[in-house]
Amino acid sequence: MRNGLKKLAATGAVGLSMLTTSLVGATGAHADSQDGCPYPYVCIYAGPDSSTIVAEFRDITSYYQSTYHGPGFSVVNTRNQDTVWLRIDHGGGPLDYECLTNASHPNNSLGSSGTLTGIMISSNTSC
């Protein structure tokens, strides 16, 4: 009888240990950085997306936040669900508006020859 109780206690301890490990090891939604841009930011680079980050944006807005980055800039969106709208001036013509998908899609970065004049992070999940 005593051996049976020891086995039952040992089995219970192992089961509790496994349950604790699985609960502690569980994580929420996985988020990664991309090209040095940390989640949940939208990063602007001075050149290609592997160059120096010159600005980071995080706030969802209903308007374009003013920014100014000359030709050759690039932008990366690391946000899991939000899209990003960019206002780009190519000079001498109408402004160009580009949308970047969220980080789970392949079109979440952009390089441009124009001048970035505004950025808007939207809670919309698609462009």
Image: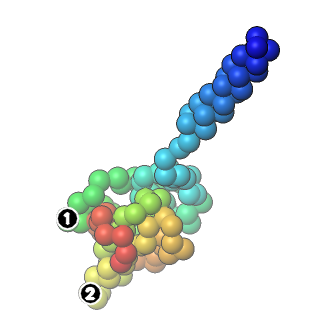
Q: Residue at x 49, y 47 (%)?
A: 28
State the mark number for residue 110: none
Residue type at the position of mark 1 = Ser
| Helix, strand or loop for disc 2 | loop
Residue 63 in view in this figure: yes
Location of the N terminus (image quadrant): top right
Q: Which residue is mark 1?
A: 62
Q: Residue at x 37, y 75 (%)?
A: 126
Q: Residue at x 60, y 34 (%)?
A: 19
Q: Is residue 15 above or below residue 7?
A: below
Within-10-Å neighbours for mark 1: few <14, some 14–19, many 20+: few
Q: Residue furthest left?
A: 62
Q: Does the CB distance between marks 2 and 1 fall below 8 Å?
A: no
Within-10-Å neighbours for mark 2: few <14, some 14–19, many 20+: few
**Quadrant in which residue 77 is drawn:** bottom left
Which of the pair 44/42 is nearer the observer?
A: 42
Residue 91, given in percent of the width and then of the height, sits at 32, 82
State the mark number for residue 94: 2
Residue type at the position of mark 2 = Pro
Which of the pair 106/109 is nearer the observer?
A: 106
Q: Residue furthest right?
A: 3
Q: Nearer the viewer, mark 2 or mark 1?
A: 1
| Helix, strand or loop for disc 1 | loop
Tally the numbered discs.
Answer: 2
Residue 99, given in percent of the width and then of the height, sits at 37, 76
Location of the C terminus (image quadrant): bottom left
**Quadrant in which residue 26 is drawn:** top right
Residue 83, given in percent of the width and then of the height, sits at 37, 68
Which of the pair 5/49 is nearer the observer?
A: 5
| Left or right, residue 18 beside residue 1 | left
